[in-house]
Amino acid sequence: MSGQPELGRADLLTMLAEMTGKPADEVPDRVGSMELAWLVHMVEQRHDRRLDLTDDQLAGIRTVDDAVAVFRACLSVPADG
């Protein structure tokens, strides 16, 4: 899927800005459970695939940078079927 743009920090900040109604540069770096659920949903839609995140992966996401690392790792694994 070389046509897929790489997921970056700016992408996630833009997604959080949509959720909060704030400009992307005012979105806090900290990611709570509501923000995490929103990001997972948005990344799944954008990349048209389900992210099968483990409990440990989810628990490890506390900041936007954490989310970028986990989502990139998940998206780098070939989709089933």
Image (cartoon, rainbow, N blue to C red):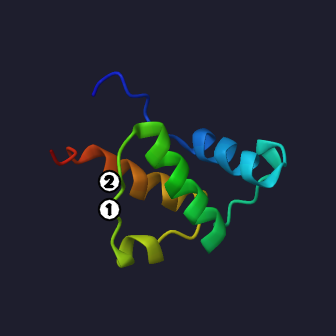
Mark 2 and mark 1: Cα distance apart in space: 8 Å
Residue 12 image offset from top left, x and y in percent = 60, 47
Dividing the image into 4 quarters, which one contains the N terminus? top left
Asked if the residues shown at circle 2 and circle 1 are in contact, with their CB atoms under 8 angstroms apart, the answer is yes
Residue 42 image offset from top left, x and y in percent = 54, 48
Residue 48 image offset from top left, x and y in percent = 39, 39
Residue 74 is marked as 2
Amino acid under label 1?
Asp
Circle 2 packing at 10 Å, graded few (<14), some (14-19), many (20+), is some
Residue 80 is marked as none
Q: Viewer-proximal residue, 41 or 61?
A: 41
**In percent of the image, x 48 and y 52: which residue is there?**
68
Look at mark 1 in the image and give the residue it sits on. 52
Amino acid under label 2?
Cys
**In percent of the image, x 44 and y 48: which residue is there?**
44
Using the image, determine if residue 62 lies above or below residue 66: below
> Relative to residue 50, is residue 59 drawn left or right?
right
Q: Secondary structure at mark 2?
A: helix
The residue positioned farthest toward the front in the image shown: 81
